[in-house]
Amino acid sequence: MPKEEAKISVYDHGLLYGDGIFEGLRVYNGRIFKLEEHVDRLYESAKSIMLTIPMPKQEMIAAHVETVRQNGLRDVYIRSIVTRGVGSLGIDPRSCPKASVIIIVDKISLYPAELYEKGIDVVTVATRRPSVDVLSPRVKSLNYLNNVMAKIEAARAGAFGGIMLNSEGYVTEGTADNIFLVKKGIIYTPPGHVGILQGITRDTIMTMATESGYIVKEEVFTRHDIYVADEIFFTGSGAEVIPVINCDGRVIGTGAPGPITRYFIEEYRKLVNSTGYTVFTS
Ligand code: PMP
């Protein structure tokens, strides 16, 4: 249905309590990138919060393809949402008989191209990422206030992005992107247990790096490691691979996107333009 006609009940628990989950996908030239992986993660998030998605995975995949097809544009963003559904005003999910499924396909607003050439500056924010025993960041839930607070802090500090630490001071991720560090040619990214969303772009880069002969290590690291890194970059479906060239006023490496970051920016772009779930054949 058209954007203006799409409506949701004010009694939907997705709105009332952030009780739900979501995914963000990209369509490149009529092909949905990593569709199965995103749908798998959606069903894993659902399972973790005991939310029954009222359709099998294959039907969900078909619904994504059909929504993109009806939208008609070849380069778009998809936001898939499953909420607990319409219920009473209490938090008890048992008042919600059926989950609501929403698939939005819209134009994507990309970051300016110059950010990929020059890199972005970031700050570490005071808002900590919840630990895995509080609310696992692996669940891509509709509760994004933690990330929103971090984003506000970064913006107030005049930075483009924010890096979130966990309660022990270890680096977790950006406000909505994963983080990678390069030191002496080795690539590091924080492991799942520090409290991160295990990004699909992160997985893609880790595989690509290993296949290209790089050593990739999932290791915990601190702010100090960021300050003295040779290269830092963020990854995410929206941002793709974006260089970070300053953190908390410390210049990273040479202050310009490094060779390994630039390699992944290029390779990732090649991959997204040559693979994916085909919606439009001509
Ligand atoms: N971390 C968080 C908190 C996110 O919301 C996202 C998605 N924007 C990512 C990391 C990156 O995940 P993906 O590569 O699957 O888009």
Image: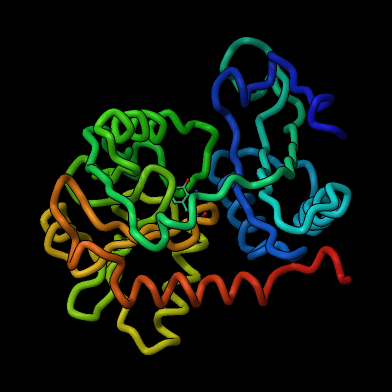
Given residues 118 and 166, the one toward you in this image is: 118
Q: How is the image coloured?
A: rainbow
Corner quadrant of residue 225: bottom left
Corner quadrant of residue 281: bottom right
What residue lies at 34% left-to-right and 43% top-to-bottom?
A: 161
What residue lies at 54% left-to-right and 45% top-to-bottom?
A: 48
Q: Reply above or below: 125 against 90.
A: below
User: x, y percentage for residue 5?
Assistant: 84, 25
- Left or right? Give the position of 57 relative to 184: right
Given residues 272 and 112, the one toward you in this image is: 112
Residue sitting farthest toward the top: 89
Residue sitting farthest toward the front: 114
Q: Locate the C terminus and report the quarter of the image it occupies.
A: bottom right
What residue lies at 86% left-to-right and 54% top-to-bottom?
A: 69
User: x, y percentage for residue 275?
Assistant: 67, 75
User: x, y percentage for residue 156?
Assistant: 29, 28
Corner quadrant of residue 210: bottom left
Residue sitting farthest toward the bottom: 213
